[in-house]
């Protein structure tokens, strides 16, 4: 799969530019075990990079002309780095333009290049294909033109590109996971300090199965930014009563409960979810370390309940997928994953039970929504890297 992606991307480059790409980079998508919508709330998250990649075949130019081909979409975008870069109606190019704009500001960057990229990270499935593109290109420019950026800076550049050129005020989780991923390790990331530690992703007789709802609701961007505004409003109120609270990290459930009336129903629910979710990540890490998979599964299911009922970022299709496996003996826990409003659920399931489970849920899903379910059994892999043959 990885080999085929590299081969196809390289061949496309060769056909278009009549020579071999000087570099090939692989930038992975991510899963997240637990810790959803808490990265921009100074919480902890537990993501990992996966064996699905954006592959970039690229060569530098002698001037500041740039030509980028999105192979999967069969689209070409050309521009000159000396020109002012502004967000473009062609969505995919914004992930890259946003990165380049920052490099222009930080590093007076004006090195042109030719590139072809292609992706095995499914788009709109909550597996962070966008972070993989941003970080892949930022990593590539850093390497090719020796810009001296650290991995953390690359992740932050990816995040800022999303804010400034894409319009999603995302947290840092996706970019961090894409850049810092390690084989068979999950990353416990403190999104307040960006300190991180790796934990062995050893699920013993269980495996992680992704069920892709194959839907992507249009309010993904607006809903995401609305949630962010709601919790920010809530935090202002909480801080005004409890000056010792600096972030949601040192805010307790009791504090939020005390302010239920003043926060109002919606903001209360959002803040309550955040406080509980931050705690759940800590508990999940303990459970993983102690191989207590029943506990881990229960925490994942609690997260889904919160995301669906309190944070309200799930959708009918995702709720259905989670409910459909709730009483399966082979499933220890399930929840929607990522930003929400569509995309995948992540399921902790007994190894060997996947095929039967997928068949059963696919049938139910098709008869309810008329949509074909997709599924992925992912491996936890290393982060953005240059591929050497
Ligand atoms: C999206 C965002 F990009 C992340 O920063 C994170 O907030 C996630 O949704 C929800 O946990 O993937």
Image: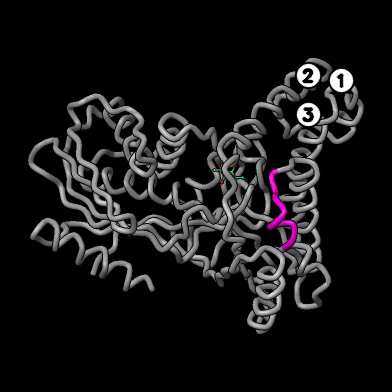
| Quarter location, residue 361 | bottom right
N-term-proximal mark, 3 vs 2:
2
Q: Which residues are magenta?
A: 313-320
N-term-proximal mark, 2 vs 1:
2
Q: Residues within 10 Å of mark 3 (few under 14, many from 20)?
A: many
Circle 3/circle 2 CB separation < 8 Å:
yes
- The overriding secondary structure of the stretch rendered in magenta is helix
N-term-proximal mark, 1 vs 3:
1
Query: Residue 220: percent from the left, percent from the top?
Result: 58, 42
| Quarter location, residue 21 | bottom left
| Image quadrant, ligand 1 | top right
The residue singled out by tag 2 in the image is 237
The residue singled out by tag 1 in the image is 262
User: On the rendered image, what quadrant is the C terminus found in?
Assistant: bottom left
Circle 2/circle 1 CB separation < 8 Å:
yes
Callout 2: helix, strand or loop?
A: helix
Vertical position of residue 326 compared to residue 383: above or below: below
Q: Which mark is residue 267?
A: 3
Callout 1: helix, strand or loop?
A: helix
* Coloring applied to the structure: one colour
Query: Which is more toward the observer, 116 or 388?
Result: 116
Residue positioned 64% across, 66% down in the render: 370
Query: Residue 210: percent from the left, percent from the top?
Result: 61, 66
Is-magenta flag for residue 74? Answer: no
| Quarter location, residue 368 | bottom right
Residue positioned 81% across, 63% down in the render: 295
Query: Residue 387: percent from the left, percent from the top?
Result: 29, 63
Q: Residues within 10 Å of mark 1 (few under 14, many from 20)?
A: few
Vertical position of residue 369 compared to residue 138: above or below: below
Query: Of circles 3 and 2, which is in front?
Result: 3
Query: Of circles 2 and 1, which is in front?
Result: 1
């Amino acid at each position: 799969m990885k080999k085929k992606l590299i081969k196809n991307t390289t061949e496309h480059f060769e056909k278009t530019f009549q020579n071999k790409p000087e570099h090939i980079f692989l930038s992975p998508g991510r899963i997240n075990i637990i810790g959803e919508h808490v990265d921009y709330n100074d919480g902890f998250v537990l993501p990992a990079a996966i064996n699905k990649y954006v592959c970039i075949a690229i060569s530098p130019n002698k001037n500041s002309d740039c030509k980028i081909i999105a192979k999967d979409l069969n689209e070409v975008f050309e521009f000159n780095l000396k020109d002012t870069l502004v967000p473009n109606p062609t969505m995919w190019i914004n992930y890259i333009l946003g990165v380049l704009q920052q490099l222009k500001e930080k590093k007076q960057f004006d090195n042109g290049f030719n590139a072809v990229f292609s992706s095995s990270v499914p788009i709109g499935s909550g597996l962070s294909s966008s972070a993989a593109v941003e970080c892949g290109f930022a990593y590539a420019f850093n390497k090719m033109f020796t810009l001296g950026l650290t991995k953390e800076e690359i992740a932050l550049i990816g995040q800022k590109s999303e804010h400034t050129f894409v319009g999603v005020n995302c947290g840092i989780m996706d970019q961090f996971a894409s850049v810092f991923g390690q084989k068979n390790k999950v990353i416990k990331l403190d999104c307040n300090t960006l300190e991180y530690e790796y934990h062995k992703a050893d699920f013993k007789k269980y495996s992680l199965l992704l069920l892709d709802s194959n839907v992507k609701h249009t309010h993904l961007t607006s809903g995401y930014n609305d949630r962010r505004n709601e919790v920010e409003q809530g935090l202002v109120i909480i801080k005004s009563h409890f000056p010792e609270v600096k972030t949601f990290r040192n805010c307790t459930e009791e504090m939020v409960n005390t302010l239920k009336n003043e926060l109002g129903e919606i903001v209360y629910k959002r803040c309550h979810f955040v406080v509980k979710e931050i705690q759940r990540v800590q508990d999940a890490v303990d459970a993983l370390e102690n191989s207590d998979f029943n506990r881990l599964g229960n925490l994942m299911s609690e997260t889904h309940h919160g995301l669906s009922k309190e944070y309200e970022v799930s959708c009918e299709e995702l709720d259905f997928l989670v409910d459909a496996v709730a009483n399966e003996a082979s499933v220890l826990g399930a929840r929607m994953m990522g930003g929400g409003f569509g995309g995948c659920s992540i399921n902790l399931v007994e190894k060997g039970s996947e095929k039967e489970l997928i068949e059963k849920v696919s049938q139910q899903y098709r008869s309810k929504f008329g949509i074909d379910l997709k599924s992925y059994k992912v491996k936890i892999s290393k982060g953005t890297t240059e591929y050497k043959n």
